[in-house]
């Protein structure tokens, strides 16, 4: 089982991710802020896009603990990684900062998307390297 960590920062906002490759599947934990936790879980499975069968998309299911707001984040991130890598993906996320401005919430979403792209690039690079060394 391969484990890799990633992070993304913008000023005071820092989020981290730990990715575990479990066989062909991925388990991604995302956290940040002053009180990291598990607020939501998203599971996504890749599939050909319904709009364009030449592209890949994903279908997801999400669970959110009462009072938490990470549901949209785990949906977006699990689907992006599943479609990008064509792997089953589970994402947990929990971030908390006191007194964030609305623009900071937008930045957290952008940082999470940046993490998803970093994860996809990192896993794809590693897979290409493994195939080329066989």
Image: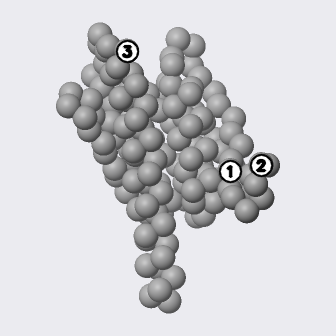
Quick check: marks 1 and 3 in contact, CB under 8 Å? Answer: no
Q: Position of residue 119 (x, y in %)?
A: 43, 54
Q: How many angstroms separate mark 2 from mark 3 (CA)?
A: 33 Å
- Residue 113 seen in this snapshot: yes
The residue that disc 2 covers is 51
Q: Position of residue 48 (x, y in %)?
A: 75, 56
Separation of disc 2 and disc 1 at Cα?
A: 9 Å
Is 121 in front, or is 69?
121
Q: Is residue 121 above or below residue 45?
A: below
Question: Is residue 57 placed above or below 133 in the rendered structure?
Answer: above
In the rendering, which numbered label is found on residue 102? Answer: 3
Say which label, 1 or 3, has the lower sequence index: 1
Q: Position of residue 74 (x, y in %)?
A: 54, 34
Q: Position of residue 29 (x, y in %)?
A: 45, 41
Q: Residue at x 77, y 48 (%)?
A: 51
Question: Horizontally, is 68 left or right of 106 in the view?
Answer: right
* Neighbourhood count class around disc 1 (C-alpha, 10 Å): few under 14, some 14–19, many 20 upward: many
In the figure, 46 relative to 114: above or below? below
Q: Which mark is residue 57?
A: 1
The tag earlier along the polypeptide, 2 or 1, is 2
Q: Are marks 2 and 1 in contact (CB under 8 Å)?
A: yes
């Amino acid at each position: 089982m391969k484990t890799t960590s990633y992070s993304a920062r913008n000023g005071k906002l820092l989020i981290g991710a730990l990715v575990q490759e479990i066989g062909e599947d991925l388990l991604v934990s995302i956290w940040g802020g002053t009180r990291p936790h598990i607020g939501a879980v998203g599971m996504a499975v890749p599939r050909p896009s319904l709009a364009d069968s030449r592209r890949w998309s994903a279908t997801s299911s999400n669970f959110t603990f009462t009072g938490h707001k990470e549901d949209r984040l785990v949906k977006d991130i699990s689907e992006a990684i599943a479609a990008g890598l064509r792997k089953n993906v589970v994402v947990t996320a929990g971030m908390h900062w006191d007194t964030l401005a609305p623009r900071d919430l937008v930045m957290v979403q952008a940082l999470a998307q940046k993490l998803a792209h970093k994860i996809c690039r990192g896993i794809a690079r590693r897979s290409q390297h493994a195939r080329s060394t066989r």
